[in-house]
Amino acid sequence: MLKSDDTVVAGISGGADSVCLLFVLLKIRERIPFQLLAVHINHKIRKEAEEDAAYVETLCRQWNCPYYYIEENVEEYARVQHISTEEAGRIVRYGAFADVLAGAGAPDGKIAVAHNQNDNAETVLFHLFRGTGIAGLSGIRAVRGNIIRPLLCATREEIEEFLGKNQIAYCIDKTNSEDTYTRNRIRHHIVSYAQKEICERAVSHIYETSIIAGEAETFIRESAGKALSGCAKYLQREIILDVAVFMREDPFLQKQMLLLAMEDVVGSRKNITAVHVSMLLQMFYRDGNASVQLPGGMAVYREYDKVRLTCGETVERADDQGDKKQLVIPGVTWYQGMAFEASLLSCEKSQIIPVKTYTKWFDYDKIIKSLMLRTRQTGDYLQAYANGGKKSLKAYYIEEKIPRAQRDHIPVLADGDHILWVVGQRISEYYKVDKETKTVLQIQVTGGTTDGGKDQSTVDRERS
């Protein structure tokens, strides 16, 4: 984690974990000389935030450590960026750490954060409940890039006990006791129950398992990389795979190879799920030519004995153009040359509802029948007003001045006769997410063309 002459920025909130982190780093500095800078970030959310900042400043002065104070309105940032408050806070924190390192003349320095075994257990369980592979089960890494976590080997109870023995005070964040966020609910109700009723060392056991999973993930990633290089030709943002060579690999390794290939082409694994890996794998089992659109603007083509992955293209599809098709939840459904990717999310108060044209959220609990992708039919309606007022789909098309020739070709998502979404336009007021929503149905559309030939994901990016 550390070597002589490193420059290390430590995130110090004033809570038990971060205060312990600062104390430990100062003790380590007595043996390994490095520059240590403490950074406190006021998110402008809690009333007690200024008191926390004052305590951290006093502590840094007492312990002779340089102190940096940064203010950032995280809620406003989340609103502007259309992301959750948690995600906004993470972006702001690491951005601030990078700025302090750059100002200290050490842009490649280390960032020390105070995650512990309990944080790791919550992360592993969160990944497991939402669906994950070995990478997700590996939880939080002690070292990832220039980020180090010196306290990851300790439990939250051990940290608080250590501070108590050394008579070191710390601040208490009242929001940690609330159940607003999913992580807090996992902490208070699942991890706590496991420790009391199943095994008191549950947190440590999860940590030990995550270490094993992390080692396995590293080994698998390296093995997949070697196997991929043996059957792949790399171009700029494009990979061409030899089908015959690829098919000689173990089925498990094949999926890992495809994950790496997609990550290389798009630049990230974000939004790539097991569904997309399966869609790509099917291309190797098809005869002749075929194509499929995947997240991140990735297009995949089966061209005789090769499979080509490329970024920035939109697949033109002539298949899956039937009159109607049932929406697969969760999964991907092709209709009119577009991929409708449906997923279920737990509703969080802090989450920002997307305002993108081709990504929509619906209250899943209000849906009565199987959802169908189709075009208009007699009797279709939508709730056009918040007070419950309805409007026929025909009347809506007329009011929006949609040409008669186009009306029979516009895809809609329907719950019986009730239209949830006129795709690319409006959704029904009835299905909108509100404060009573427990489960969110998210639908993201890619592929197809609109707005002068631009694909849906491009339109979303421009309008957001």
Image (cartoon, rainbow, N blue to C red):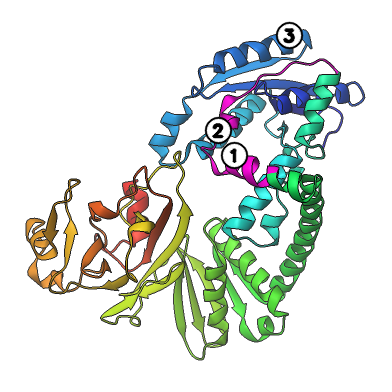
Q: Who comes first in sequence, dot 1 or dot 2? A: 2
Residue at mark 2: 178
Q: Who comes first in sequence, dot 3 or dot 1? A: 3
Residue type at mark 3 is: Arg
Q: Secondary structure at mark 2?
A: loop
Q: Who comes first in sequence, dot 3 or dot 2? A: 3
Residue 299 seen by the camera: yes
The Cα–Cα distance between marks 3 and 1, rounded to whole angstroms, is 32 Å
Task: Give the magenta range.
Answer: 166-192
Residue at mark 3: 61
Residue type at mark 2 is: Glu
Numbered badge on residue 130: none
Residue type at mark 1 is: Asn
The Cα–Cα distance between marks 3 and 2, rounded to whole angstroms, is 32 Å
Residue 173 in the magenta stretch? The answer is yes
Q: Secondary structure at mark 1?
A: helix
Verify CB contact (< 8 Å) between mark 1 and mark 2.
Answer: yes
Residue at coordinates 64% horizontally, 17% vertically from top-left? 68
Q: Secondary structure at mark 3?
A: helix
Direction from residue 395 to residue 169 in the image, left or right: right
Measured along the vertical axis of the image, is residue 438 above or below residue 64? below
Camera-nearest label, 3 or 1: 1
Measured along the vertical axis of the image, is residue 130 above or below residue 338? above
Residue 464 in the magenta stretch? The answer is no
Residue at mark 1: 184
Q: Residues within 10 Å of mark 1 (few under 14, many from 20)?
A: some
Q: Residues within 10 Å of mark 2 (few under 14, many from 20)?
A: few
Verify CB contact (< 8 Å) between mark 3 and mark 2.
Answer: no
